[in-house]
Image (cartoon, helix red, strand yellow):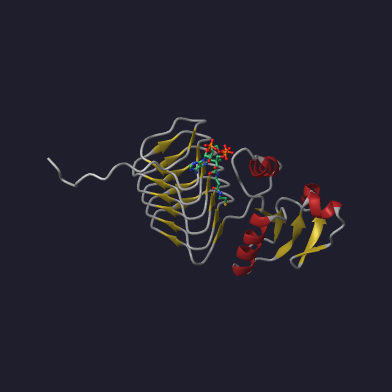
Amino acid sequence: MSPLPVILLGGGGHAKVVLDLLRVLKRNVLGVCDPGLADQGIQLWRGLSVLGDDHAVERYAPADIELANGTGSLPGNTLRYRLHTQFTRQGYRFATLVHPSAILGSGVKLGQGVQIMAGVIVQADSRIGDNVILNTRACIDHDGVIGDHVHVAPGAVMSGDVTLGDGCHIGAGANLLQGIRLGSEVVIGIGTTVLTNVAAGHQQTGQPPRAPRRINEE
Ligand SMILES: CC(C)(COP(=O)(O)OP(=O)(O)OC[C@H]1O[C@@H](n2cnc3c(N)ncnc32)[C@H](O)[C@@H]1OP(=O)(O)O)[C@@H](O)C(=O)NCCC(=O)NCCS
């Protein structure tokens, strides 16, 4: 059975990347819904018909289409989460999209609406929740457990056996030690190295280098 046609939600920066991915995957994209574009009377965006604001989705039956969430995810911005939960409640499904350049190990499980961008690596037995973005060149090593609505930003590295609670944001280029557990809604700043667990609702930033010490010193 061929995949269902797709409607893209949002016409910003993340949506451009999602649209490129849909095109690489040769998905039939019916158009884009974006209140900003609709308000400006723009009819065509990157070759796609502007269907209207988000309510334009409701002209299609949930069984006939899939949605692609083109809204990005940054700390404090809940639009992506809200669109996912609202349309899921209405019976719509979000397409799970994996860039052909990504590498998925054995036993990897992906939730609904996961977006895996170019160059991502997900190693064996990792589980990725719903509406997660694994952004460009991110890495989830073996046995990772990634909650719903998490964004792992470009180039961030989760070592083996890392657990991220729902709604975490892992800043670009961050590094997490193996076995680290983050509670829900944790924010890790760009470039931060995380060596200890972080409780739910906390933010950790910074990169204090320690004084060098000789390895194997008695
Ligand atoms: C963690 C983050 C959300 C903090 O944002 P914020 O709460 O608005 O914090 P501010 O920018 O006001 O910075 C507060 C302080 O922390 C410092 N800081 C912020 N992020 C930092 C980081 N990653 N490393 C070191 N210091 C950082 C700021 O320099 C500032 O220091 P000051 O008080 O001495 O001036 C943000 O810096 C971040 O890293 N966002 C992730 C971005 C990302 O992943 N982008 C990719 C998108 S695809």
Q: Which residue is outermost to the right?
A: 41
Q: Position of residue 193 (x, y in %)?
A: 40, 44
Q: Position of residue 213 (x, y in %)?
A: 22, 44
Give the image quarter of residue 13: bottom right
Q: Position of residue 104 (x, y in %)?
A: 43, 59
Q: Quadrant of the C terminus?
A: top left
Q: Nearer the viewer, residue 163 or 136?
A: 136
Q: Position of residue 46 (x, y in %)?
A: 74, 66
Q: Residue at x 32, y 41 (%)?
A: 210
The number of callouts visible is 0
Q: Residue at x 36, y 48 (%)?
A: 159
Task: Report if residue 1 is visible in the image.
Answer: no
Rendered view: 193 above or below 118: above
Q: Residue at x 50, y 36 (%)?
A: 186
Q: Quadrant of the N terminus?
A: bottom right
Q: Taking 83 as reference, is 116 left or right?
A: left
Q: Residue at x 61, y 46 (%)?
A: 73
Q: Nearer the viewer, residue 19 or 94?
A: 19
Task: Report if residue 32 is visible in the image.
Answer: yes
Q: Taking 129 as reference, is 90 left or right?
A: right
Q: Nearer the viewer, residue 98 or 44?
A: 44
Q: Taking 153 as reference, is 14 left or right?
A: right
Q: Which residue is outermost to the left?
A: 218
- Quadrant of ligand 1: it is top right
